[in-house]
Image (spheres, rainbow, N blue to C red):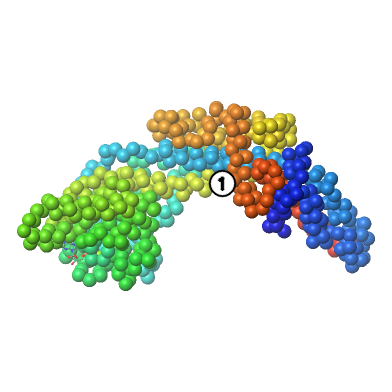
Amino acid sequence: MTRQIWKQALKSCSIAAVPLPALSVKCDVGILVDNMRQYCESFGLDDISLIILASQVRKSVVELKYVIKSPLAKEISKEMAEKLLAQATGEVTYKMLNSFLDGVAEDAQRVLIKALETEEKATPFHPAPLLHPAPCTPSRTPTPCPSPTFMALKMEEQKFIPGNKFAKDRNILPGVSEKETEDIKAALEAGDLSGAAYVAHKSDELLKKTELNIAITGESGAGKSSFLNALRGLGDEDKESAETGVVETTKEPEPYKHSKYPNVIFWDLPGIGTPHFKPDTYLEQVKFDRYDFFIILASERFRANHAKLAQEIRRMEKKFYFVRSKVDFDLYNEKRKQNFDEERTLEKIRNDCVNNLSREGMSSPQVFLVSSREFQKYDSPKLQKKLLKELESHKKHIFLLALPNLSKPILEKKKKALQRQIWKQALKSCAIAAVPLPALSVNCDVGILVDNMRQYCESFGLDDISLNALASQVRKPVAELKAVIKSPLVKDISKETAKEQLTKATGKGLILAKHFISMIPVAGTIFAAERSFTVTYRMLNSFLDDVAEDAQRVLIKALERENK
Ligand SMILES: Nc1nc2c(ncn2[C@@H]2O[C@H](COP(=O)(O)OP(=O)(O)OP(=O)(O)O)[C@@H](O)[C@H]2O)c(=O)[nH]1
Ligand SMILES: [Mg+2]
């Protein structure tokens, strides 16, 4: 029955609606009366049903009627419906506070992210050559370079499940201990953004501990495993190297540690587009979303699979380098042509990659031309330097990507707790010392709204004191943090601001109601219909609640035994 209320409310507000000036509501009270009666009857609260019930349980009808709080079906009149409508006001204020609270919660999220993100600057890491084997020198099977966590997981899983070898779930912050995660959560719960930032911003430590998983992906045979070996300074025949071959070789993602930074892990992925790894299932099979950064490797032509991989990475808001492999092979083939020019050929390949990626919507794609056979030539030195230089910012990026996973549920929870109080506040504002705001057709005490708006801001840490503390914590000008806040700041919240917010809420309500009202002829203005819709909807809803409770009480009363 609840599901039908909106239809009935609409019917009452549109067809043959009559203005009720005292309530600023237009509706057909007759339709409401019919519905109220129908609710009573369908719950057995009409005279006939009550007489039958009374005789069934051998009690007097009067005794049963005594526990009914709603009017009986035959007593329901137009006057009674109007009285209940008058009780169902306060809806516009309710919406306004709700949407304002949404804005504040989003602001808190943005401020925290802004506070923690850093400009890209020279790396504090000291670039070291990658060209020597990793200190960890594992055997080729089963896992080339297992870290303790990988080993633990490896032992757990006898059977290979692709992508299952990750050390931890990505729902917790990378590089942050459990204790630190709890501290961040507690600070967020207390609306202490600067406290949360303090823990998260001890970033030197954090960055050392943050694990960066770099996936090397591309089509089968593109030279991914060979490229990884070259990057680690190994030949294809070395004991610790990844297996390479002329047929499909890598059948599951394998981790290999960075030679200098153990928390940087390269993942040699199987190739996309073979019968084992069809394009449609590849991303899921290799658990593509679990890697932090990507190197797409392509030999020969730019293909649809490369576009698919690039698009997916962009969709995840992650980054990649595009490596065009086996350029030695291309040059060898081109050499046979009479007007061969090595530089021009390389430029042609590079431009082709950049153009194809740009066509896919990638802005300033990073393209490197390499040969694993002649790894010191072409763009490999540039690629290695760039990778080392950007390690910190890649790590920071994954930290910021993970942060909302932690903070969102907490801020949501906080918001919900405040939300539960809104109806009381809306009522207070509409009842005690309410003042008419003719321009909005709303009666309320704007002062109460102002108090609430300020309280929301403060409890989310968006007041001046908290913002200053946060700014000094993260060493950024407070203006930079304030720039991302869309709601008014605490000190700027005035009665005027509250009125502006009320106006916005009225607008929002109209859009929602228009959707329904557009389906049937509307009497009067859309605004009046929308307002009437919400008010009558509420009234019918609470009336139905009462009737349902009454029915419950009657039934209990009918069945209970008197203690004689
Ligand atoms: N000429 C030349 N050949 C290369 C280069 N890189 C790889 N190859 C050869 O290409 C073939 C495939 O190389 P892999 O490294 O196994 O390719 P992959 O992408 O790992 O293949 P899958 O594991 O099947 O996905 C091997 O025969 C390599 O020797 C290169 O830079 N130049
Ligand atoms: Mg391979």
**Is residue 358 visible to the viewer in this orientation of the structure?**
yes
State the image quarter where residue 327 is shown.
bottom left
| Residue closest to the eye, 210 or 63 | 63
Where disc 1 sits, the SS reads helix
**Which quarter of the image is occupied by the N terminus?**
bottom right
Left or right of 20? Residue 256 is left
Is 458 placed above or below 150 here? above
Which residue does the image show at 68% across and 45% down from the upper left?
529
- The answer to whether the residue bearing label 1 lies less than 8 angstroms from the nearest atom of ligand 1 is no
Figure quarter occupied by ligand 2: bottom left
Locate residue 12, reporting x and y percent.
Answer: 74, 50
Which residue does the image show at 25% across and 69% down from the upper left?
249
Left or right of 271? Residue 536 is right
Is 249 placed above or below 116 here? below
Total number of numbered discs in the rendering: 1
Left or right of 453? Residue 118 is left
Which residue does the image show at 27% across and 54% down from the upper left?
356
Amino acid type at circle 1 is: Lys
Q: Name the residue beneath numbered marker 1.
A: 413
Which residue does the image show at 35% across and 48% down from the upper left?
210
Which residue is at the far left? 338
**Is residue 189 visible to the viewer in this orientation of the structure?**
no
| Residue closest to the eye, 324 or 75 | 75
**Which quarter of the image is occupied by the C terminus?**
bottom right
Other-residue count near label 1 (Cα within 10 Å), few / some / many at <14 / 14–19 / ≥20:
few
Locate residue 257, reporting x and y percent.
Answer: 27, 55
Is 233 placed above or below 208 here? below
Locate residue 344, reporting x and y percent.
Answer: 13, 51
Locate residue 26, reporting x and y percent.
Answer: 74, 44
| Residue closest to the eye, 247 or 211 | 247
